Image: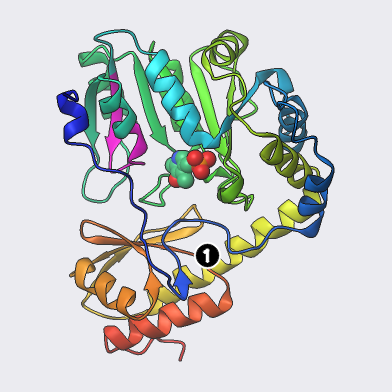
Amino acid sequence: MLPEKLRTMEPYEPLSGTFDVRLDANESFIPPDDSILTALSKLQLNRYPDPYSRELCTAFAAYYGIDPERVTAGNGSDELIGIILSSFLGEGDKALCFSHDFSMYKFYLKLYEKQIVIYNKPHDLTVDIDEVLRIAEANNVRLIIFSNPCNPTSLGIKREEIIRLIESTKAIVVLDEAYMDFFNQSLIKLDFSNLIILRTMSKALGLAGARLGFAVAGCEYTRALQAVKSPYNVNILSQAAGTAALSNKALIDENIRRIISSRDMLYSRMCAMKSDEIVTVFPTCTNFVFVRMRDAQSVFTVLLERGISVRVLGDCLRITAGNERENDVLISALEDILSIRSENT
Ligand SMILES: *Cc1c(COP(=O)(O)O)cnc(C)c1O
């Protein structure tokens, strides 16, 4: 007989089916450069990969201007979240998550049978650091995990506020900066003994299919991460693809600019849509736009029928910035569904 927790769990199912316009997973719309594929042709696939992904971590550290000794690579940051939440919390230890935030934090905490404390964000979805500190203290939590900028709210918290949080708590702070390439408030160059920063190549860096994530931390936590991870967690193809991608700084910077400009276009066109159906378009520090709607569920369903996939979360839609055509198709469909004309047409 399976344990109770497994009987109620369902396999993760991203949207299945084929859609002409996919704006549901926050991926980059820019296909990989040919140099990345060239790098894969000379690999010794008969050999195990480097267990510590040293070349990859060095390329990552060079791109961000940090010490490679502080970097641990993972099979997506998802793997690192799982490793941290399973092994950095002892039996009975509590972890603090925010709501809404990235769903995998709660997923792993439940799977590993950890105690979960929730900070519920107010209606405007901002984060009150004093309230977070109060809840952390009152519940004596061992670890605090959250994303900044936040998926799904697209909102960002200023660096000073995060530093105040880290300096005011004894808890381990796991700061998921999956979207920080679109916001300029990273803590990646700072060293705090109770901080782990997570980064990924899945969003701004355009390699979601290669599954590459990184943990950046001080020597104590880095040693612990390297001790508990599975030995060959990042395969040889992904290590090479990531190393090649990170070595082309000019191209990464250019791609990030293109994504931000697409995001800004999508955001301003959403703001320009005047409809009672659109309640709030949240300011965005990410590569997606988060919109509170009167009836998000039915708009989501009609978009899907038209071959356009976005994410629906309660009364909100999360729409990834796509290429020009994808954004155009989405905006026209929305205008059509909501029977409105945007101000700039
Ligand atoms: C997409 C995302 C991740 C997952 O990244 P992978 O490296 O693809 O596993 C982690 N955190 C947040 C907040 C994300 O949105």
Identity of the residue drawn at 82% across and 54% down: 35
Q: Horizontal and vertical percent for residue 117?
A: 22, 25
Relative depth, front residue between 162 and 28: 28
Within the magenta stretch, is there residue 103?
A: yes
Query: Is 10 placed left or right of 34 in the picture?
Result: left
Q: Horizontal and vertical percent for residue 161?
A: 44, 31
Q: Eyeballing the image, is 104 above or below 3? A: below
Quadrant in which the C terminus is drawn: bottom left
Relative depth, front residue between 335 and 308: 308
Identity of the residue drawn at 78% across and 44% down: 244
To which residue does mark 1 refer? 263
Q: Residues within 10 Å of mark 1 (few under 14, many from 20)?
A: many
Q: Eyeballing the image, is 122 above or below 64? A: below
Q: How many marks?
A: 1
On the question of residue 113 being in view, the answer is yes
Q: Eyeballing the image, is 319 above or below 217? A: below
Q: Horizontal and vertical percent for residue 183?
A: 55, 47
Within the magenta stretch, is there residue 329?
A: no
Query: Is 98 placed left or right of 288 in the picture?
Result: left
Which residue type carries mark 1? Answer: Arg
Q: Is mark 1 within 8 Å of ligand 1?
A: no
Relative depth, front residue between 71 and 163: 71
State which quadrant residue 141 falls in.
top left
Query: Is 217 placed left or right of 313 in the picture?
Result: right
What is the image's colouring?
rainbow
Q: Horizontal and vertical percent for residue 130?
A: 30, 27
Q: Which residues are magenta?
A: 95-105
Quadrant in which the N terminus is drawn: top left
State which quadrant residue 5 falls in.
top left
Identity of the residue drawn at 74% across and 47% down: 245
Identity of the residue drawn at 64% across and 49% down: 205
On the question of residue 182 being in view, the answer is no
